[in-house]
Amino acid sequence: MIARSLVASAEGPRIELPKTSAGRRVVPLVPAATAALALQRDLQALDKDALSTWPDNDFVFTTQVGTPYDPRNVSRYFTNACAAAHMRHIRLHDLRHSVATMALTSGTHPKLVQELLGHANIQVTLDTYSHVIGGMSRQAADDVAGVLFGPNDTPSK
């Protein structure tokens, strides 16, 4: 469940509530993600066992002393990982857009994408991804033709 956000501030990382009630949500995870998080918890337990002053928090990703990572450092780590993998530079936030774009182009209903992203209303999702949705009009026309004429009886193009 997403119930809090860790944001960078001049005083260091701080915890905030999501901007809207829609931002407080459950995000479904694929089994590989669940397994990766469980492995991270196991690795973290090794650091936790070695340190008597581990802070009482529930972060999955922490420094070796149990404090949350500064969000700016996470972005730097991601940039370095992309470079090491010989990938073009993208922002960490771009992964969010990639997931939304892939979901929409694979046929996921925009309402479900809205809920996944935590947008307060569907219009935000539709406006943000209008370039993707607009490009899907050919597929929509073909889908309707398939319903009207059957999959093998569509008029020739």
Image (cartoon, grey):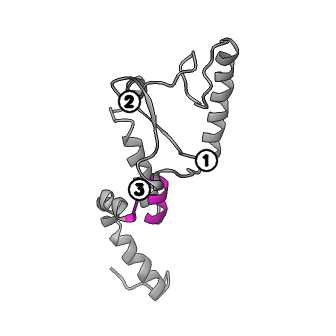
Residue 43 sits in quarter: top right
Q: Nearer the viewer, mark 3 or mark 2?
A: 2
Q: Is residue 26 above or below residue 156?
A: above
* Mark 1 or 3, nearer chain start: 1
Question: What type is the residue that disc 3 sits on?
Answer: His
In the depicted view, which residue is nearer to us: 9 or 108? 9
Question: What type is the residue that disc 2 sits on?
Answer: Ala
Dot 1, how many residues are within 10 Å of its Cα: few (below 14), some (14-19), or many (20+)?
few
The answer to whether residue 46 is visible is: yes
Q: Quadrant of the C terminus?
A: bottom left
The answer to whether residue 108 is visible is: no
Q: Does the magenta stretch mainly form a helix, a strand or a loop?
A: helix
Q: Is residue 87 left or right of residue 109?
A: left
Residue 138 percent across, percent down from the top left? 34, 71
Callouts 2 and 1 close, C-beta under 8 Å: no
State the residue position of label 3: 119
Callouts 3 and 2 close, C-beta under 8 Å: no
Q: Is residue 3 above or below residue 42?
A: below
What's the residue at 57%, 15% (across, down)? 65
**Range of the magenta residues?**
110-122
What's the residue at 49%, 85% (across, down)? 150
Cα distance between the residues tagged 2 and 1: 28 Å
* Mark 2 or 1, nearer chain start: 2
State the residue position of label 1: 30
> Dot 2 lies on which element?
loop
Dot 2, how many residues are within 10 Å of its Cα: few (below 14), some (14-19), or many (20+)?
some
What's the residue at 66%, 18% (across, down)? 48
State the residue position of label 2: 8
